[in-house]
Amino acid sequence: MRFEYALQAALFGTTAALVIMQSPIANALSREEVQTIAQQITVRIESGAPPGSGFIIAREGNTYYVLTAWHVVQQNDEYQIVTADGERHTLVVEDYTTKVQKIYEKDLAVLQFTSDRDYQTARLGNYDLQRGENVLAGRTDLVFVSGTPFEGQEVEQAPVEGDRLLSPGLRMPLDMASGLAKQSIEEGYQLFYTSDTYPGMSGGPVLDSNGRVIGVHGRSEGETLAEQESGSSDFRVKAGFSQGIPISVFLDFAEEVGIQRSQLTLESSAPTPLEQQDIGSLESLFIPKAGLSDSREWVNHGNKLWRLANLYQYYGDAQAEQLKQRAFQAYNKAVELSPNFYQAWYGRGNLLFELGEFNDALTSYSRAIEIFPYEEKQQEFETLGQPTNAEEQQLLNALNGELGFYATLWRYKGIILSKLQRHEEAVKAFDKVNEIQEFDYISWDLRGMSLLALGENEAALESFDRALLINPDEYSHAWIHRGLALGGMNNLEGAIQAYNRGIQIQPNTYQAWMSRATLINEFLQQNPDDPSALDRALAIQPDEPDVWHRRGWGQLSLQNHQDAIAAFEEAIVSNPEDAAAWTAKGMTLLMENRYDEAADAFAKAHQLDPNNTYLQEVRDAISDLEDNP
């Protein structure tokens, strides 16, 4: 192994741990064990409206608290909460205003029921979901969604207990999924996964491989349709990602709905992936039914094969590529049967995108755009105007969803064009998205990146500012990209402050830390006689918990290795079990060629974080260098 390569790979991998210390890794559970936990905590919520799901999070005496999606319980109505033992707990309409509470501006709600029976409450996984998403490994976590689809649907997956499903999938990195999701992140939706979900599962728990709840499921990117070329009956075609709200969003507002953290079971350890041999127990949940008869079924078949391929790819199994080719054949069969079936062209484009076949993906997305009856749908939407009853509201929501899908096709086209370095065309594609959905801040951000690539920094800055006007507090990427634009305009202090804001929202972003370090170096060189320049650039406050980390990284950006080591040592004095500080110290010692001391620092970090494979890679690389100087 060449030291330079191994060290580069290892340091990319440990960057996420350099900012926030991770707790020890918990033990992974089998799929059956996760299923048992999900069964005990998941409830079904019934009323006059379509039913939904939820899960029990806390108990106070005989009062149980259920977390669900707000849209499941938003009607002032009587609700039946059906627990795992089949018991029905009635929440009468007179108690609605006191026992159903919406989480502020989020699609979340807490409702109560009373029982003297003992029901299991959920363990909540309160850890950084984006840890390590920007590292070279490129892997993310396995998740399970638990819930009960409502009756009358075509559900291909076999239930695990009663009518309830446990649907496995892979959690997608936010920076990837937010650009590819059919809907923008709103109302708290920042969790994306490939699980196959259905209406009725909204409000159910999203569990990790250790059986902890990490989110509330709320959306499934699919639509029920009757495709004229393939049949007249309604059939749900699933596309894109499922979406949920991270449990951390609920925790931020828990006290406002009367729930103290002391009432909850919180765990901060990162999950352990299931072993590869467990993939067999999951594969059966992905197998679609036999006897495909029309293009809609072929599209769903392709979607399932694609999800199964992603699961194999997660474990590095060679079958992944074979399954993707089978998925591609399924999409081709769908468009062969129904050449004007735009959902099939959409699925085909998605797969080609993942395969890196960008020109062919562009053809598929362009074909879907050409087929989509935009003018007709837009006219229907405008004619409907303000709904006067529930039926009209339902129709308006459906039309809004279809128009949103059309905007998605343009967004995907813009992303592909930018991948092909056709940035002027990409800007026009994103303009089309924003014409349809002016509050799609992700498209404003993507538009800005294409303008940056064209060297149009001021126009790019305007785009990033539009994105931040819509979502200033949750979308870190636009702040980071704003820093890029300001840096290109030689506004170093403004750029650094933009990076500071992005890092504040999402601390584990390697690109932001490194880009900011470069700018800080330039800024301090321009202010050599200002002793407060570093703290000012970093917006440091003396009482901040990570002050020594930030000073250490600031000194490292100036190549002041001794000062950086001293800062990281101060962080260690403050918290001897801070694996991130030990790692940062070890990395800086390596830069000083102090290999023995570096090895000791990495050994201590690895002792504190034994499941961090990247730390082991660094130790192996140091050993390799010592053996082959």
Image: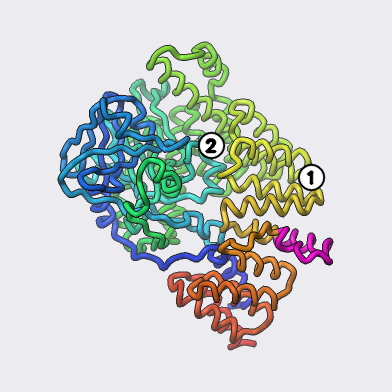
Pick the residue in front: 165 or 497: 497
| Label 2 secondary element | loop
Pick the residue in front: 330 or 407: 407
Percent position (x, y) of residue 398? 44, 23
Quarter of the figure with the C terminus: bottom right
Q: Which residue is mark 2?
A: 184
Query: Can see residue 435?
Result: yes
Q: Is residue 12 above or below residue 569?
A: above
Quarter of the figure with the N terminus: bottom right
Pick the residue in front: 227 or 94: 94
Q: Is residue 65 above or below residue 16?
A: above
Q: Is residue 120 above or below residue 240?
A: below
Q: Is residue 532 magenta?
A: yes
Q: Residue furthest front?
A: 543
What mark, if any, has residue 455 been given in the picture? Answer: 1
Earlier residue among tags 2 and 1: 2
- Amino acid type, residue under disc 2 in the picture: Ser
Q: Quadrant of residue 111?
A: top left
- Amino acid type, residue under disc 1 in the picture: Gly
Percent position (x, y) of residue 17? 53, 65
- Residue range highlighted in magenta: 517-537
User: Cα distance, mark 2 to mark 1?
Assistant: 27 Å
Percent position (x, y) of residue 401? 48, 27
| Label 1 secondary element | loop
Percent position (x, y) of residue 88? 18, 36
Q: Residue at x 16, y 40 (%)?
A: 86
